[in-house]
Amino acid sequence: MDFKTFVFYVLAAIMVFAALRVITARNPVHAALFLVLSFFSAGGIWLLLAAEFLAIVLVMVYVGAVMVLFLFVVMMLDINLDRLRQGFWSYLPVGALIGVLLVVEMALVLGGRYFGLEAMPEPPAAQAGYSNTRELGRLLYTDYVYPFELASLLLLVAMIVAVTLTLRKRKGVRYLNPSEQISIKRGDRVELISMSAEKE
């Protein structure tokens, strides 16, 4: 076993352990931190595969932005853990069945003839001046331009729907109408009263 294979197995073991702790940790903050650890391990595996751009994007976007947002949301919301655990055992058989089906499906796909060493041999060494970032951009904007545009359109629709859901009218909430505020005249707000002077 060479050093690269040893590092791969170490990172894979850390990632599997962190993924298991994400779904078994009782504290949601601890679960989010274990998810950060699994992202770092996945980034290390991508570095071993010579995909430096994807590894950096995974660490910067998911760990640096998305997971920080998750942590802020989890810490700001006062989550009642006892209430979340109610009815856990009633859903356990269905969840276990779905988990077993997913494991069997992954074993059939990864253990078949599509992902073996014969089907996917080690790629040749990169030439001098080769950039996987440039190659990734070339593939995205040439061969996969339509799926890329479709994904961007779906993200745009999801963003519009999220904004629409947050701006819906709720009962018991006071709203200000800017047009009514601008159209108000002085006579509608200020009333001048003439009073006679009084002396003690």
Image (tube, helix red, strand yellow):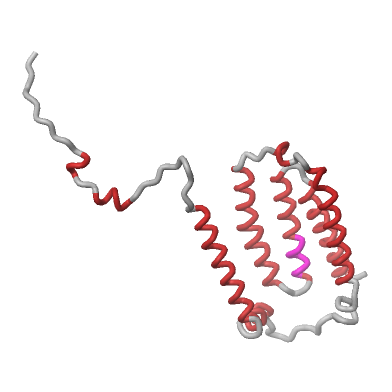
Residue lying at 23% horizontally and 47% vertically, measured from the top left: 184
Q: Quadrant of the C terminus?
A: top left
User: Which region of the structure is painted magenta?
Assistant: 41-47
Main secondary structure found in the magenta portion: helix
Residue 51 place in picture, x, y as percent: 72, 73
Residue 106 place in picture, x, y as percent: 85, 67
Q: Is residue 137 above or below residue 29?
A: below
* 72 lies left or right of 22: left
Camera-nearest residue between 73 and 161: 161
Residue 144 place in picture, x, y as percent: 65, 81
Q: Is residue 174 above or below residue 199?
A: below
**Count of numbered labels shown in the rendering:** 0
Question: Can residue 91 be found in the magenta stretch?
Answer: no
Residue lying at 6% horizontally and 22% vertically, measured from the top left: 197
Tell me which corner region of the image, top left, top right, bottom left or bottom right, holds residue 3. bottom right
Q: Residue furthest top?
A: 200
Residue lying at 65% horizontally and 60% vertically, measured from the top left: 62
Q: Residue furthest front?
A: 171
Camera-nearest residue between 143 and 93: 93
Q: Residue furthest right?
A: 1
Q: Quadrant of the N terminus?
A: bottom right
Residue 2 place in picture, x, y as percent: 90, 70
Residue lying at 84% horizontally and 80% vertically, measured from the top left: 122
